[in-house]
Amino acid sequence: MNLYETTRGTGRTKVGLSAHHMGDDLVIRVYNQNAHIGAVAVGEYDHETGRVSTSVITRLGHKDDVVAQKAAYLIGKATKKPVCLIVGVHLDNVTQEEIAELLQNTDSLVNEFISRGCKV
């Protein structure tokens, strides 16, 4: 099984992205040093309308759904294939600046993955 992995950021705001195929579909994990399952999103591309539908499950008390839904939509739109995002990023006593940096690092990882053709 081929695996694509990359990271962005340093210290507490370092985030990783890994992707692999499950058949023709993509399974992608976004995580930090406190990796866990915080939210799961599925993006499904509709070839008739050209639209992507996303469904999200979020664990109680977690906020990973924002990242999961956005990434599932963007990668589903780019690949025109089903994609499953598993996101778990956690920092104790996180600051607003760290949240902004985590979101920026995550966006950068997703955009890089898309720009390289979502190749695993």
Image (tube, rainbow, N blue to C red):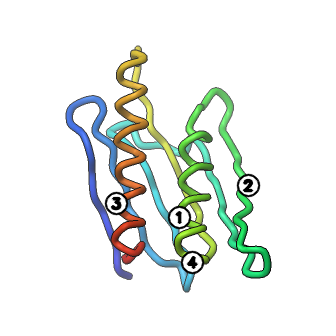
Q: Which mark is residue 75?
A: 1
Q: Quadrant of the N terminus?
A: bottom left
Residue pictured at 55% horizontal, 85% vertical:
23
Question: What secondary structure is found at the residue carrying circle 2?
Answer: strand
List x then y, in percent, for residue 89: 44, 38
Q: Which mark is first along the chain, 4 or 3?
A: 4
State if disc 4 and disc 3 touch (CB < 8 Å). Answer: no
CB within 8 Å, label 1 to label 2: no
Evaluate if marks 4 and 2 touch, with contact meaning CB atoms under 8 Å apart.
no
The residue drawn where x is 35% and y is 49% is: 108
Residue of label 4: 25
Eye-nearest disc, 1 or 2: 1
From this view, report whether residue 41 is shown above or below residue 84.
above
The mark that comes first in sequence, 4 or 1, is 4
Q: Amino acid at mark 1?
A: Ile
Q: Amino acid at mark 4?
A: Asp
Amino acid residing under circle 2? Ser
Instruction: Determine the image quadrant of residue 33.
Output: top left
Residue ID for mark 2: 55
Relative to 32, residue 43 above or below: below
Residue 19 image-quadrant placement: bottom left
